[in-house]
Image (cartoon, rainbow, N blue to C red):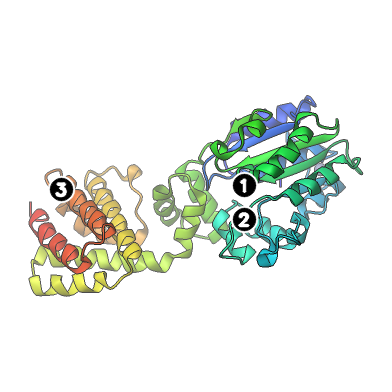
Amino acid sequence: MKFSEVLGNEQAIGQIRRMIDADRLPHALLLYGEPGVPKLSLAMAAAQYLHCTHHTDGDSCGVCPMCRQHQSFNQVDTHYSFPFTNRKGDSTNPCSSDDYIDEWREFVTRYPVEDYQAWLGLLKNDNAQPQIFVREAENIIRKMTLSAYTAKYKVLILWLPEKLKEEAANKLLKLIEEPYDDCKFILVSNNEKGILQTILSRCQRIELRKPSTPMVAQYLVNRYGMEMQDALALAAPADGNVNMAERMVQTGSEFHEFRERFIEMMRLSYQHDLALLKGWSEVIAEMKREKSRRFLDYAVRQVRENFIYNLHCRDLNYLTREEEAFSTRFSPFINERNVEGIVAELERASADIAGNGNAKLVLFDLTIRLSILIRK
Ligand SMILES: [Zn+2]
């Protein structure tokens, strides 16, 4: 992984690059930020840059033997530690991260932006909470007390230190506090508040920021071959959470369905045909509770987007091409007299469904209110 492949966070990249150039990378560096913000890639890029023998334009070269080893996750002085579940839940026979190295390689290869949900899927153990156990802490100590083989520094990339069991964290403390000269720890956290204070206080911290919507959209274009307009429409509601944006791409069929349902809802409301509205409500009520709420979130977003469309602020608009085709005709019906009222009704319906309200009644009531508001 090269710095140039990391999404966003140019400032943090510059800071880390300068530390390495000056041979002042701290013994323990913590990269933290919200879930869905790319962080692991920066840790891997930093390790590769630290080891690369031919720095080129402020980045690792990508072709020297060290870079090649990094790119194939075979660099002997680079270790990874991460939360996992003990296989079969057998506490008398606990595992180490080495037992999960195949799953880990698959994870970092398949998911350029680390996604904890995807990691849970790869661990194939739905019942247990992944943690970093004492045996793994001992494993880390063993690896980090060996001399570096091929490089000046050994690196441990520890993903999710907030999952360290207290006993495991206590074992690691001394190593982090008084490390060997050739040890570098890079900790990568989704929730720095969940890290034990004793560990946290020994780390130099860098907060990583959410990538911008255009940046996330460009990532979706590159990875999924989408059109930029469609990618922007998916990236905007994800608000810098790349995991969420990717899930929206993967559940694209749901969005297609939501778009159709939204168009029906608005048409039938305008026609004020109570029998058809009742039928429509019953169809939506058949959805699982969470799905019907996702639909209502989608509807809120569409109403707001159509209001903006109507104001001719196209550069503020995030609509897919298909959505836009409907908006050219529909947007005039959303105006300053009804936009907030419609949004409030959709949000109220979502809250009522969350609170175990009868979905059929809630949705039918919603459409009747919409049919009054849409004519304002
Ligand atoms: Zn290199």
* Residue wearing tag 1: 163
Front one among 53 and 185: 185
Q: Name which of mark 3 and mark 1 comes first in the sequence.
A: 1
Front one among 259 and 165: 165
Q: Secondary structure at mark 3?
A: helix
Q: Secondary structure at mark 1?
A: helix
Quadrant for residue 20, please give it: top right
- How far apart are the alpha carbons under marks 3 and 1? 44 Å
Amino acid residing under circle 2:
Pro
Whether the residues at callouts 1 and 2 have beta carbons within 8 Å, the answer is yes
Front one among 37 and 197: 197
Amino acid residing under circle 1:
Lys
Q: Percent position (x, y) of residue 114?
A: 60, 52
Disc tally is 3
Residue 260 to residue 335: above or below: below
Whether the residues at callouts 3 and 1 have beta carbons within 8 Å, the answer is no
* Residue wearing tag 2: 130
